[in-house]
Image: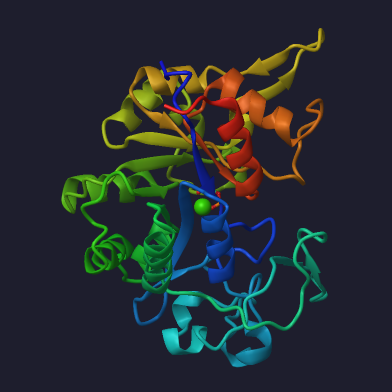
């Protein structure tokens, strides 16, 4: 069981992405200033094998790649980061996430967030981002963690890349490989987590992400099974925690208006697994939940999670600091 007085950790999801475009360095600086405990990095590789901080294996949803490198488009219509040298990716302007219609129209996924406009924002390398965080830790007298997701390991493996080794090498170069209290590694793919622990002897805490089975995140992983006692027994053999979708915990309300929670948190914590669900967003308040504060109350106080991914680290920091006593 979790200690109900232990402060849950605030994980800035792609930075302070409620306020600035995801995974840009300003979004990370803002999240750092807001007091996030951990800053999240989604990582993919470039053609020359450099880990960059980018959520998608594609570039067109968060950068101006279609304007700058129209000839790099694959036949399937996508621009793959793995087809670009780092020097090319560094020329791209990053922007708020868009959805793209079949006609090619681009509209903001979150229209009330930072405007879609020309900018000086860039796609950072993992090394650049770590330098920024370490620098801010020094100047602000803080210790801020990295929370790195290995994106699409199967895709990278099929293309001939060992992304786990590349990421671990950056962590070694930057002096973070032996800081288990300051780095989490996460993935939806159990194979890469087992590889990190068993083959690369990685002792950093590992988090098994759990998708909704309907998303088709990874056809090789049975995400329904991972939410069962037997599935969590397996997870506990190679990982230190789980990162479920928060709606796998908060199921809704029954006919009498009582909130319905799954048993996932209890089952995981009984096996020594930490529980860090994703993602709190002002734009995603479930039906029946009054506001963002009530959503946080349900996750932290009712469900008892150990930490959470949030697009609004300022609001989550404030909630935790005012509802959990200082040690
Ligand atoms: O890694 C936790 C959460 O970020 C998973 O979802 O798609 O935002 O990477 P995604
Ligand atoms: Ca992520």
Where is residue 44, by image quadrant? bottom left
Which quadrant of the figure contains the N terminus?
A: top left
Residue 46 visible in the current orientation? yes
x and y percentages locating residue 308 in the rendered image: 54, 38
Foreground residue among 140 and 25: 140
Count of picture labels:
0
Vertical side of 160 occupied by 37: above or below = above
Query: In the rendered view of the protein, which quadrant contains the C terminus?
Result: top left
Q: Position of residue 228 (x, y in %)?
A: 45, 22
Q: Please identify the residue farthest to the top as the structure is shown.
A: 256
In the image, is 106 to the left or to the right of 261?
right
For the point 61% across and 30% down, which residue is it?
Answer: 322
User: In the rendering, at what x and y percent does residue 286 appear?
Assistant: 76, 33
Point out residue 248 in the picture as x, y percentages from the top left corner.
59, 29
Question: Is residue 33 found left or right of 166 in the rendered image?
Answer: right
Q: Is residue 55 visible?
A: no
Name the residue at 45% across, 58% down: 151
Towards the viewer: 151 or 77: 151
Left or right: 219, with 204 as reference point: right
User: What color scheme is it?
Assistant: rainbow
* The image quarter in which residue 61 lies: bottom right
């Amino acid at each position: 069981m979790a200690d109900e007085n232990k402060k849950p950790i605030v994980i800035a999801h792609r930075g302070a992405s409620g306020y600035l475009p995801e995974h840009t360095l300003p979004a990370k600086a803002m999240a750092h200033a807001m007091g996030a405990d951990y800053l999240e990095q989604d990582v993919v590789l470039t053609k020359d094998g450099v880990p960059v901080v980018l959520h998608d294996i594609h570039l067109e949803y968060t950068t101006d790649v279609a304007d700058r490198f129209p000839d790099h488009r694959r036949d399937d219509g996508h621009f793959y980061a793995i087809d670009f040298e780092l020097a090319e990716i560094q020329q791209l302007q990053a922007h708020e996430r868009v959805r793209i219609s079949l006609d090619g129209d681009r509209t903001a996924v979150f229209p009330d967030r930072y405007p879609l406009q020309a900018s000086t924002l860039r796609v950072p390398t993992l090394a650049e981002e770590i330098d920024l965080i370490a620098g801010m830790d020094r100047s602000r007298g803080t210790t801020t963690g990295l929370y790195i997701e290995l994106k699409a390991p199967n895709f990278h493996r099929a293309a001939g890349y060992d992304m786990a080794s590349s990421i671990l090498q950056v962590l070694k170069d930057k002096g973070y490989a032996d800081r288990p209290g300051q780095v989490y590694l996460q993935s939806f793919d159990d194979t890469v987590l087992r590889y990190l622990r068993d083959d690369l002897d990685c002792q950093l805490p590992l988090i098994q992400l759990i998708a909704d089975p309907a998303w088709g995140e990874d056809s090789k992983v049975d995400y329904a099974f991972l939410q069962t006692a037997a599935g969590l027994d397996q997870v506990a053999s190679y990982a230190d925690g789980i990162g479920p979708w928060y709606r796998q915990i908060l199921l809704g309300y029954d006919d009498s208006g009582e909130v319905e929670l799954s048993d996932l948190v209890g089952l995981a914590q009984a096996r020594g697994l930490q529980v860090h669900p994703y993602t709190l967003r002002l734009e995603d308040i479930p039906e029946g939940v009054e506001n963002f504060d009530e959503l946080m109350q349900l996750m932290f106080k009712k469900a008892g999670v150990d930490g959470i991914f949030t697009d609004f680290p300022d609001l989550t920091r404030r909630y935790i600091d005012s509802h959990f006593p200082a040690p």
